[in-house]
Image (tube, coloured by chain):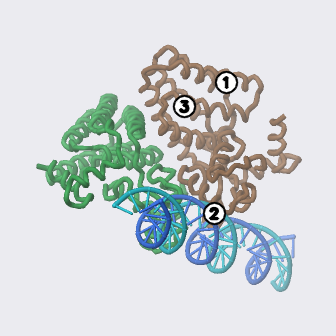
Chain colours: A green, B brown, C cyan, D blue
DNA sequence: CTCTCCTGTCTGGTATGCAAGATTTACATA
DNA sequence: TATGTAAATCTTGCATACCAGACAGGAGAG
């Protein structure tokens, strides 16, 4: 029996909240996660916060700088490539191993694509980032394999962090079309083709990243200095300018 | 358990020791892991032991029964099938994605196969269990992808636990031949064939399990009672005899 | 004015203490 | 002898206290 779920503890809440925040692109890479602050926010002691952090650390979602603090992971360029390579291996293997697409699965996929279209029409970038990652979790869910789903969920979280770090301009429509192609292949029962499309899609997305430019700790500072407003606003400005 | 302490500073030394114990089939599924005992053995307080346990729990290697204790995971039959399915997806995807086999990789593989042969000749079952799992880690290492290596290492640990639970008789030679076939295909540069062979191999191993027979909590007790000596001593005897 | 050093304050790291649940054991009773 | 009950003794869960490292800011020397 899979009676591993012991119920709803507060430290699970902390963990879930942070992951959810990352998956929805609300928490940015490098964000400081103070034990004390989280403790007061969640109304618990630091002990439980620490446990949640430890768990997140094993999932490569946060990291700790000794005596300095916990931070949301900032994957390096090399790490980014590794994660994408791993996703290509797993997702293509998953699609290739499929033998049928259930009606429930088909409906979920199409519902998701509809959501993507909606978000594109609305120009909601944050929601799009979330949905683009979610699509691949939907794919994993087709397999019904909890192990794979968990793995891909974590990889998706890391991917979102990577996107936020290295994605200069977001070709949402391009990604969306890639998703549509994969779903089309699945609809047609052409699982091998879907697998190949997923590899191509992930390569395409990875090539859209700017992994060559060393992620310079000073880059934030530089962009900040070139702009009158606060640093946090600079990215918002970039987003709105890209929308036009 | 006495020979686990390595006396390092390590906070994750505890984690490593336990994983290593599982990978080498010295620690059996369901083994109780007392916080106090581990704390004294490793010469630290319960705090750090707990942190290690938490991390291992997120890797599905141990689980906690509230207020009862920590135990080495005992994967259910369903979980076992899920893990094997995930391994098929990932390992086949990994092999299929390969484009070349480096000389270093080739040498490592052949060295490993030689070890397997040696262990078979010696009839060392515990060592064989370890090696049979290690082979798949060697495969992962071919990719040089740390993410995949970590994932497969954890899955291998779970697989070993599964083997110990459900594997009635161990067809070591059969597994070994399967490994040889995969290496042959890799040597020939036939990565697609290697991928297909890995799927067949994993299916073969899974079919060798007895997943139908419900794991009886009393089985340990029964087998113990059928033996003249005490149950706890039999394990110690097996270990020490292996050391010689 | 600049550089250095010192100190106050904040951070996580670790250990410990207490509370509460679960299990087992001892014991009284039928 | 079998059984129900209560207490003793484990276990983990959680919070707190204290320690040490890192950083910032100010004072003083050059």
At label 2, counting other C-alpha atoms closer than 10 Å, the crowd grade (few under 14, some 14-19, many 20 or more) is: few
Write the residue at 31% across / 48% down. Answer: A219
Please state the horizontal and vertical placement of residue B163, each as a whole percent of the image: 64, 39
Residue C25 left/right relative to B4: right
Residue A101: give its label. Answer: none
Is the residue A143 above or below the residue A41 in the image?
A: above
Marks 1 and 2 sit apart, C-alpha to C-alpha, by 44 Å
Q: What residue sits 15% from the left and 54% below the top?
A: A122
Q: How crowded is mark 1: few (under 14 residues within 10 Å), some or many (20 or more)?
A: few
Marks 1 & 2 on one chain: yes
Q: Which mark is residue B47?
A: 2
Mark 1 vs 3, N-terminal side: 1
Q: Which chain carries label 3?
A: B
Q: What element carries label 1?
A: helix
Q: Earlier in the sequence, mark 2 or mark 3?
A: 2
Q: Left or right: B183 with respect to B161?
A: left
Question: To which residue does mark 3 refer?
Answer: B202
Q: Nearer the viewer, residue A156 or B78?
A: A156
Asked if marks 1 and 3 fall on the same chain, the answer is: yes
Q: Please give the chain letter of the residue carrying mark 1.
A: B
- For the point 64% across and 24% down, the residue is B112
Q: Which of the two residues, A172 or B192, is positioned nearer the viewer here? A: A172
Q: Mark 1 points at which residue?
A: B173
The x, y position of residue B124, in whole percent, is 76, 30
Residue that lies at the very extreme toward the right in this rendered image = B228
Front label number (1 vs 2): 2
Q: Is mark 2 on a helix, strand or loop?
A: helix
């Amino acid at each position: 029996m899979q009676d591993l779920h012991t119920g709803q503890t507060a430290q699970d809440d902390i963990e879930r909240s942070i992951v959810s925040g990352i998956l929805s692109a609300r928490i940015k890479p490098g964000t400081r996660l103070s034990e004390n602050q989280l403790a007061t926010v969640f109304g618990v002691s630091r002990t439980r916060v620490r446990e949640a952090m430890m768990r997140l650390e094993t999932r490569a979602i946060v990291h700790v700088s000794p005596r300095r603090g916990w931070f949301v992971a900032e994957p390096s360029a090399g790490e980014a490539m590794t994660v994408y390579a791993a996703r290509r291996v797993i997702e293509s293997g998953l699609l290739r191993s499929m033998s049928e697409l259930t009606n429930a699965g088909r409906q979920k996929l199409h519902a998701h694509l509809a959501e993507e279209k909606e978000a594109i029409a609305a120009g909601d970038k944050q929601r799009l980032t979330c949905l683009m990652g979610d699509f691949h979790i939907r794919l994993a869910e087709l397999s019904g394999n909890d192990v794979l789903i968990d793995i891909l969920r974590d990889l998706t979280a890391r991917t979102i962090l990577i996107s936020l770090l290295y994605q200069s301009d977001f070709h949402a429509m391009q990604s969306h079309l890639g998703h549509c192609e994969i779903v089309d292949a699945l609809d047609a029962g052409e699982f091998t083709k879907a697998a190949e499309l997923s590899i191509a899609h992930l390569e395409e997305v990875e090539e859209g990243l700017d992994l060559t430019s060393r992620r310079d700790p000073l880059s934030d500072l530089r962009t900040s200095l070139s702009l009158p407003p606060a640093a946090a606003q600079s990215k918002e400005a970039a987003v709105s300018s890209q929308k036009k």
